[in-house]
Amino acid sequence: TGFSDMSRSMRVYAYSLLCQFREVLDRTLLLFDSGHVPAVFLSCRSLFEMAAHAYYTKKWATDHLKKKNYYEAWKFMLGINQGSRYMKQKYQKLPPIELVEGPHIGKVINGFNEYFKEHGDNEAREKYSFLSEFCHPNSFAFTNHIDFTEKKDDVVVMFAKPSPNICIQVLPDAWFSSWPLLSSLNELLDRKSVV
């Protein structure tokens, strides 16, 4: 496997990820405009994951290519483009195809810490944990549905649709994800940066 095959593999990844990011970002804004707050949180976490994945892929693919280790680069991109932990665990092997596993999101997020190094050693992990808190069935998600109203000597608790105002906590991360994703994909596709 040579550089031209790798170049095609990287283009498939970059264009596919860019299309997915564009669609999720577009739908995130529609969800926000429609007041679908819980879905906005899920979408913002997904956008952050895609940015981290682009950075991780750029870092390792370009590292292999700079060392002219095309076989390792090919194996890495195979896991990136076709890897599925679910398929690998469920079927092990589907002759004649050897199933591969892609990188776990925890490893990808940990690698993304490099991008934020000026803000601390664990900034990406902290941002991702914060985004995840709104997506899991716990107090961050639940309290968004509770409206406390004080009446004379009592407090009335009502369960309501969350206010879109709370999206300000996660929308900056969605917006911020655009830059590392685009710059990572640009560097991945820039032949000068890998040879």
Image (cartoon, rainbow, N blue to C red):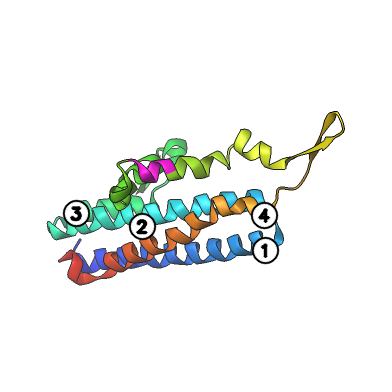
Real-space Cα separation, disc 3 to disc 4, in angstroms: 48 Å
Total numbered labels: 4
Query: Three-letter amino acid code at disc 4?
Result: Pro
Real-space Cα separation, disc 1 to disc 4, in angstroms: 8 Å
Question: At numbered mark 3, what does the secondary structure look like: helix, strand or loop?
Answer: helix
Real-space Cα separation, disc 3 to disc 1, in angstroms: 47 Å
Callout 3 crowding tier (Cα within 10 Å): few <14, some 14–19, many ≥20: some
Q: Residue 73: where, in percent of width, then height? A: 22, 55
Mark 1 or 2, which is nearer the eye? 1
Question: At numbered mark 4, what does the secondary structure look like: helix, strand or loop?
Answer: helix
Dividing the picture into quadrants, the one containing residue 70 is: bottom left
Real-space Cα separation, disc 4 to disc 2, in angstroms: 29 Å
Would you name the residue on which mark 3 appears?
71
Q: Residue at x 38, y 61 (%)?
A: 181
Q: Is residue 143 above or below residue 79?
A: above
Would you name the residue on which mark 2 appears?
54
Which label number is shown at residue 33? 1
Mark 1 or 4, which is nearer the eye? 4
Query: Three-letter amino acid code at disc 2?
Result: Ala
Q: Is residue 100 left or right of residue 142?
A: left
Q: Residue furthest top?
A: 153
Quadrant assignment for the N terminus: bottom left
